[in-house]
Amino acid sequence: MGIPVRIIALTLFITVLSAATCAEPASTSSDAEIERQVKLLGSDDFGEREAAEQALAKFGILAERALLAAEKSVDAEVRSRAARCLVGVRWQKVLKEESAFLAGFGPVFGASKSGGPAPILSDEPASPPKAVVESEDRILDWLARAQEKDGHWDAKKYGAQTDADVAQTALALMVFLNAGHSEKAGTYKANVKLAVSWLRQQQREDGAYAKPGDSVDGITHALAGDAMAQAGGFARTKDTLESAQNAVSYSIEKHQHQTADGPSGFTRTAGATDADLLTTLFFIMQLRSAKISQLRVPVESLNGIYLFLATCEAADGKGYSFLPGKPCSPKATLTGCAVAILTGTKKEDIESVVELAAKDFVPSDGRENSDALFSYLGTYVMFQQGGVLWKSWSDAVNADIKSKLVSTGPNAGSWNPSGVWASGGRVLTTSLHALCYVYYRRFPQP
């Protein structure tokens, strides 16, 4: 069985990424060089043809116009090689567009749009010892020690470049909840109670979660609403359930886009119309948690999300895009699969799409381009699928994440900030990696 063109293109993209993304706008000299390399695609010498193809791959998007013309050449060899180069160029455009889209989500988690590494607050050597003991309690212990006395987690204190206390407190709280601790039970029930109390204090009268003086960010609100709905589902605490219900009402009223045909996807800004799939995912997670916790969630809102998902699906059904009408990408496809599962799609109906996403996306392993957020989303999707797909994903994620767990010093039980969300700091990195371990949603059944 041959290697899919999409995988070949991805491999080519990774090989030339550094050169392509650092390229300056096309100049007269680069235009001339591109034209020269295009002509060499039809050289009588095989080595020259191969070298020309690799050179054009390094030019990336800059070579697109010349390659489009070469694709119409009378020379079959030139047409074939130009078409192969264009696959890589188009893939590069998709990932560049994806990166630009995801950069806007940085402030939610504490990452600066300008990027840059977060400070590594640890005496741990650069390469952690190989013999790292997997211990849920060790992770929870670090999070408990990092929690402030009033119940929140200080994002900036642990390396975040912007204030993301509400979002990161919600994520840290979810780690404890998913590990089986609640306001009424578990070793860390005091930590859960403090976190829930602090989040409740950040809730405005209209139901939105935002620190006093801050504008409401839809995703931050949805994360807090998700955590509170889970906490309410576990402990059945009246104040927590009321807070979570008010958050649901705010989400639907202010952030679900209403079309002529009814509810659709969700927007980050209240009252906006620019719904996107990643924002919608955070809201469906909140609504799903609320529904399981026996809160009131209008069925038409859930149906609206399902219909919005269809607008982000590829025409051939083999992927999803973050925005309707845009190209598909691995991260968007993982997101779409998660939304599909949360809206009740049967796992067999998306099995082939999930398999494609699993092939195209590399789980977080601490490398510069690794992505802890999507490793968690992928873990959720693969766990729901089960079988061989889940086992292969789980083995990869556990091995990669486990090897980076800090094992000694004051930050033992946490992860050093790394990858694309490194500037989100240690609490964010640790919470997302921990959620890859405690992916079980231990909710009481309705």
Image: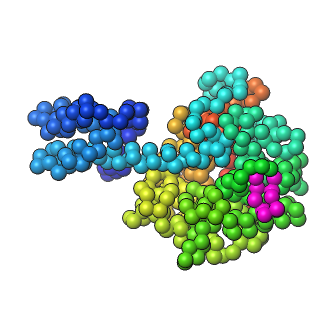
The front one of 50 and 325 is 325
Count of numbered marks: 0
Residue 402 visible in the picture: no
Measured from the top left, where is residue 104 in percent x and y?
Answer: 57, 47
Q: State the image quarter where residue 341 is shown.
A: bottom right
Q: Residue at x 68, y 68 (%)?
A: 252
* Residue extent of the magenta highlight: 202-211
Which of the image's four quarters has the C terminus? bottom right
Q: Is residue 161 above or below residue 294?
A: above
- Residue 227, quarter of the rendered image: bottom right
Residue found at x 25% / y 30%? 29
**Is 387 in front, or is 100?**
100
Residue 9, magenta (yes or no): no
User: Can see residue 4?
Assistant: yes
Coordinates of residue 57 in the picture (x, y in percent): 31, 37
Q: Which residue is painted at 64% across and 64% down in the image?
A: 271
Furthest-bottom residue in view?
A: 261
How far across and how far down the image is residue 298, in percent? 69, 75
Q: Is-magenta flag for residue 204?
A: yes
Residue for point 81% across, 44% down? 152
Drawn side of residue 195 relative to residue 115, left or right: right
When the figure is inspected, residue 404 is found, relative to residue 380, above or below; the finding is above
- Image height of 228 relative to 28, above or below: below
Magenta segment main secondary structure: loop
The picture quadrant where one finds residue 126 is: top right
Q: Give the image's coloring scheme.
A: rainbow
Of residues 377 and 246, the one nearer the viewer is 246
Q: In the rendered view, does 189 fall on the left or right side of 79?
A: right
> Where does the image place residue 82, in percent across and percent down from the top left?
23, 45
